[in-house]
Image: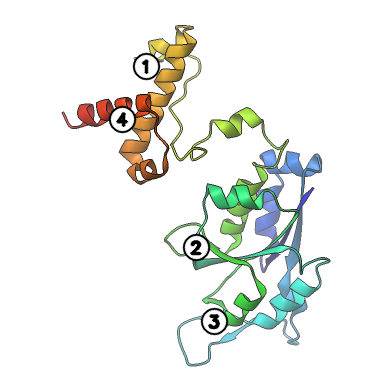
Amino acid sequence: MLTFDVLTLFPEMIEGFINSSILKKAIDKELIKVNIINFRDFSTNKHHTVDDYAYGGGAGMLISVEPIVAALKSINGYQNAKKILTSASGSIWNETKALNYSKEEHIIIICGHYEGIDARILNYIDDEVSIGDYVLTGGELPAGIIIDSISRLVKGVISDDSIIHESYNDNLLEYPQYTHPQEFEGLVVPDVLISGHHANIEKFKRYESLKKTYLVRPDLLKKVVLSDNDKKMLEEIIKNEKK
């Protein structure tokens, strides 16, 4: 079972996130476990504050390294766990990272807040990650995203077939999908998908996946190993889009 320990000042945010949908089912099936630790409980200040003004000046308040490290050391096996700090200045989180972390047994996530955390925390972590090129008020939402993206790759959480066909699995975006009704306000499901011709259906899916990636995330195409058929389809896509 993969265990997450989340260090946060706002446990209720994490609790709300993990107590519904697929994550809740994964916890109930004992495929994952999520422990939530309020590192304010480890403050040595009589007022239980965990932040202070930064040395050298600057806007906002910094979280002290002391209560976080105390919280870390309270976790059984923390030395061998993979420790992640959510930070706007970290490396970008992606599917490859999620896949690698899904093979771990114990992950600790530290949620930043306020202006940030005393930089000495970097001596106690393995990875500093960001979920995008923007700034949030706290690290709880990124922590939730990290837990979700890792957990769905743990065997048994969702079907293997769902994982195989997801966006980014082979650096291509997923093809468009449809369900009933076959026609809605003049919008119809592509004929090929109801033709029953499996080879044509697979060709359609690959073509649309290449097309969407070219239009939305062309940078990803540099990472894709393209077959000769892929290259022909991509040439056709580019030609049609330039008309």
Pointer 3: what residue? 61
Q: Earlier in the sequence, mark 2 or mark 1?
A: 2
Q: Earlier in the sequence, mark 3 or mark 1?
A: 3
Q: Give the amino acid type for the residue marked by disc 4 in the picture.
A: Leu
Are there few (<14), some (14-19), or many (20+) residues within 10 Å of tag 4? some
Q: Position of residue 78 (x, y in %)?
A: 77, 67
Comparing labels 1 and 4, the label whose residue is closer to the camera: 4
Q: Residue at x 57, y 57 (%)?
A: 141
Pointer 2: what residue? 91
- Does the CB distance between marks 1 and 4 fall below 8 Å? no
Of the pair 77 and 54, the residue shown nearer to us = 77
Q: Secondary structure at mark 4?
A: helix
Q: Residue at x 37, y 41 (%)?
A: 221
Does 88 appear above or below 202? below
Whether residue 40 is visible here, answered yes or no, is: yes
Q: Is residue 33 left or right of residue 188?
A: right
Q: Position of residue 235 (x, y in %)?
A: 26, 29
- Does the CB distance between marks 2 and 3 fall below 8 Å? no
- Does the CB distance between marks 3 and 4 fall below 8 Å? no
Q: Which mark is residue 234?
A: 4
Pointer 1: what residue? 185
Q: Earlier in the sequence, mark 1 or mark 4?
A: 1
Q: Secondary structure at mark 2?
A: strand
Q: Secondary structure at mark 1?
A: loop
Does 222 appear above or below 58? above
Q: Position of residue 45 (x, y in %)?
A: 73, 87
**Between marks 3 and 1, how big is the CA–CA gap?**
54 Å
The count of marks equals 4
